[in-house]
Image: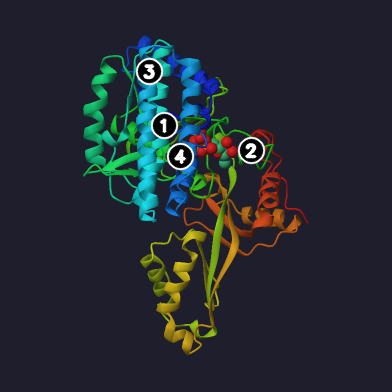
Amino acid sequence: MIVMKFGGTSVGSADAFVQVAAVVQAAAERAAAQGTPGVVVVTSAMSGVTNLLIQAAERAARGDERFHREQQATLLLKHQGVAGQLVAEGSERAALTNTFEQRLGEFDRLCSSIAVLGELTLRGVDVVSGLGERLAAPLLAAVLRAAGLRAEAIEATELIVTDAVFGSAAPLDDLTGQKCRARLLPLLRNGVVPVVTGFIGATVDGIPTTLGRGGSDYSAAILGAALDADEIQIWTDVNGVMTADPRIVPNARSLQELSYEEVAELAYYGAKVLHPKTVTPAIAKNIPVRVLNTFEATHPGTLIVEKARAESHGTVKAVTAIRSMHLITVAGRGMMGVPGIAARTFGAVARVGANVLMISQSSSEQSICFVVPDSSAAAVVNALQTEFRRELEHQQIDAIQPRGSINILAVVGSGMRGTPGLAARVFAAVAQAGINVIAIAQGSSEVNISLVVVDEDVVPALRAIHDIFELHLPTSQRTHRALPQ
Ligand code: ADP
Ligand code: ASP
Ligand code: MG
C-alpha cells in the first residue's frame, strides 16, 4: 500500500487535477493488478488558499469585516471552477457545491467572530487555515470518482490525534495509529481510495490543530507510518529533491537518492520541498519516501532511504538557505572563565520557547552568538537582559546585540563525514564571490557545514558553493577541482 501526497500546485488548477487523477489511477491499477490493498491520497489546499485564509483572519482581527467576505466569493469561484470543468452536472456537483458553501459559511462565521473579539489566537488561526484542505479533499475525491475510481473524502481530524501545540502540533502516535487503521483499512479492503486532508489534526478533545506550514508532507508520513505503508510518495512541482532550490540556482539537478539524515538537514535548513518533520515517522518504520513530480510523472524523482547508496558517495550533495533570522551576540570581556554563562544563555532562550538554529562560540570565550527566527528575536533579547541584569550592570557582559537580515546557508551531504578540506572549499567559494561570512558552524552530525550571511549575499553564495562543488554535474563527471589559489 502506498500513501500519495499532492501539494498545493499539484491541485492548483483544473489541469493539475487532471494530472493528479491520472497518477492516482495508474497507482490504483498497479495495486489492483498486484492484489495489494491500494492507495491512500493526502491533499494540500489549492495553491495560495492557505495564505489567503490566514490573511483574512489577520485582517478580521484588525477590524476589517470586508476582506473575508470578498475572499469567500473568490474561494468559491476557485473551487467551483475546477468542479465545473471536471465533475459532471447533477447530484455529485450539487453535493460538492453544498460542501463548499458550508465550509465557506464556517469561514465567514469564524472571521466575523474574530473581528468582534479583535484578537486572533493560534488556536483561531488553526481553525481558519485548515479550511483550505477541507475544501480541496472533497473536490479531489469527486474528481477521482469522475475519473472512474471509488474515492471518499476524509477529514484528518478523524485520524490524526495531536497535542494542543497550535500552529505546529505533534501527533500522538498510538491514538493516531488506532484511528487510522480503524477508519482507513476497511475502505482500502473495499477498493475505495481515501482522500485525506493534509495539514490538519485534532486534539483528544476534538479541537482542530495544524501541523505547521507545509505540513501536508508530514500528514502523509504520519498516515504512512500508522498504516505500515510500503512507500510514502510526495508529489510536487519539481523532479524530486535537487542540489539546490531550482528557483535560485537554475542549473540545480535532481538527486536520485538521499538518506533520511541528509533530507532532515536540508529540510530543517530551508529546503521547502519537504516539511522538516516528514522523515520522522518514516524513520520509525523504515518506510522509503519518494519525492516525485506531478507534472512529469515518469521522472524517477528522489528516493529517500535509511542509508543512501549515496549516488556513488558524492561528498557534498546539496546546498540550501533558511532566511528571516536574527543573530544574537552575548559579548563581554568579563565573561571569560565565568562558568555557566552558556547554560544561562540557553536556559533563558528556552524559557521563551525560541528555536536555536545555530550556535557559535569564540574560543576566547568573549562571546557567544546564536541564530533564532526573526519572530522570536525580541523575546530572546528581553529574556537575556533579565537573566544578565547584574552582569550587564557590572560590565561583565558588555552587550546583548541582535542583528537582523540574517540567513543560514547549509551545505549538506553524508559523504562529508571525515572528508578533509571541504570547509576550505566552501569558504574559498564564498570568498571568491566577495562575500563576508559572519559566523560558521559544523553540525555534530558532520553532514552539514553552516554559514551565516546577510540577505543580499544569499543568492550569490548559494550559486558560488553550488559551482565550486560542480553540483550541476553527475557525480562521475565532477573534476574534484583543487582549491583555488
Ligand atoms: P508543494 O506545494 O508540492 O508542497 P512546495 O512549494 O512546498 O510544494 O515545495 C516545492 C518547492 O520547493 C519547489 O518548487 C522548489 O522551488 C522548492 N525547493 C527549495 N529547495 C529545494 C530543493 N533542494 N529541491 C527541490 N525543490 C526545492
Ligand atoms: N496548505 C498548507 C500550507 O500551505 C499545508 C501544505 O501545503 O502542506 O502550509
Ligand atoms: Mg510543501
Looking at the rendered image, the disc whose residue lies closer to the viewer, 2 or 3, is 3
**Label 3 environment density (alpha carbons within 10 Å; few <14, some 14–19, many ≥20):** few
Relative image position of residue 96 (x, y in whole percent): 38, 21
**In the image, the residue with mark 3 has its CB under 8 Å from the nearest atom of ligand 2:** no
Q: Which residue is mark 3?
A: 94
Q: Which residue is mark 2?
A: 246
Looking at the rendered image, the disc whose residue lies closer to the viewer, 3 or 4, is 4
Identify the residue at horizontal 75%, vertical 55% (top origin): 433
Residue type at the position of mark 1: Pro
Residue type at the position of mark 4: Arg
What is the secondary structure assignment of the residue under circle 1?
Answer: loop
Q: Quadrant of ligand 2?
A: top left
What numbered label is drawn on residue 288?
1
What is the secondary structure assignment of the residue under circle 3?
Answer: helix
Relative image position of residue 13 (x, y in whole percent): 53, 25
Location of the C terminus by quadrant is bottom right
Identify the residue at horizontal 51%, vertical 34% (top origin): 47
Mark 1 to mark 2 CA distance (whole Å): 24 Å
Location of the N terminus by quadrant is top left
Who comes first in sequence, dot 1 or dot 2?
A: 2
Mark 2 to mark 3 CA distance (whole Å): 41 Å
Q: Which residue is mark 4?
A: 69
Relative image position of residue 148 (x, y in whole percent): 40, 10
How many circles with numbers are drawn on the protein?
4
